[in-house]
Image (cartoon, rainbow, N blue to C red):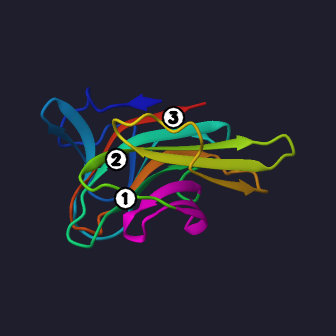
Amino acid sequence: YENNFEQAPPGKVPEDMMVIGGEFTVKAEGTNKFLELPGAPLDSFAVLFGPTEGAEVSVSARIFGTAKGRRAPTFGVGLGGVGGFKLQLSPGKKSLELLKDQDVKASVTFDWKSATWTQLRLQVRKLKDGDWKIEGKAWPQGVAEPKEWTIQFVDLEEPVAGKSSVLGSPFAGTPIGFDDLRVVK
């Protein structure tokens, strides 16, 4: 699955996406189109997309956020539907987190730059011993993708199958942009 929104009409959400909350719309800025979550109301919102998968899959996206004063948005990508795994960037905590549903399973320090596009990638794969490895990475656009995974977690339970997602909480009161959504087996 791949969507860069270039064929999507502005002001709507593509038909192959399911909004879980929030007033997402396709916006055009110059020659680029992207999915945008407005800066209000303040809550947690998500959009589901792509095929229903459980494991041996990766999701990636470019996400744009802007801090306002000491407040910053929280945003990320997810696998396995609403209650699945999420790779979430939480600039207010200066951390990159792996969550299963709403429970933080791992956290590492991450230095995020406001008003820039950030690449995020999350994958779930089965290990030889039957456990499941969840790996994530984040990096600024324009910088080479890191070879190593930034954050990892091993789960004993098989992941639930579900669609991929992008998610955001506009804590700064500023919009969050999502682009170049990709799901790869």
Instruction: Reply above or below: 175 against 126.
Output: below
- As for residue 142 lying within the magenta part, the answer is no
Residue name at image x 84 percent, y 40 percent: 128
Q: Is residue 146 left or right of residue 5?
A: right
The residue identified by callout 3 is 183
For mark 2, does the 10 Å Cα neighbourhood hold few (<14), some (14 to 19), or many (20 or more) residues? many
Instruction: Reply above or below: 41 against 48.
Output: below
For badge 2, the amino acid type reads: Ile
Dividing the picture into quadrants, the one containing residue 103 is: bottom right
For badge 1, the amino acid type reads: Gly
Q: Is residue 69 left or right of residue 99?
A: left
* Label 3 SS: strand
Residue name at image x 33 percent, y 31 percent: 4
* Residues in magenta, as a range: 84-108
The residue identified by callout 2 is 63
Q: Position of residue 81 (x, y in %)?
A: 55, 51
Q: Is residue 100 left or right of residue 76?
A: right
Dividing the picture into quadrants, the one containing residue 71 is: bottom left
Mark earlier in primary sequence (1, 3): 1
* Label 2 SS: strand
Furthest toward the right, the residue is: 129
Spatial separation of the CA atoms under disc 2 and disc 3: 15 Å
Furthest toward the bottom, the residue is: 70
The residue identified by callout 1 is 168
User: In this figure, what is the number of numbered marks?
Assistant: 3
Mark earlier in primary sequence (2, 3): 2
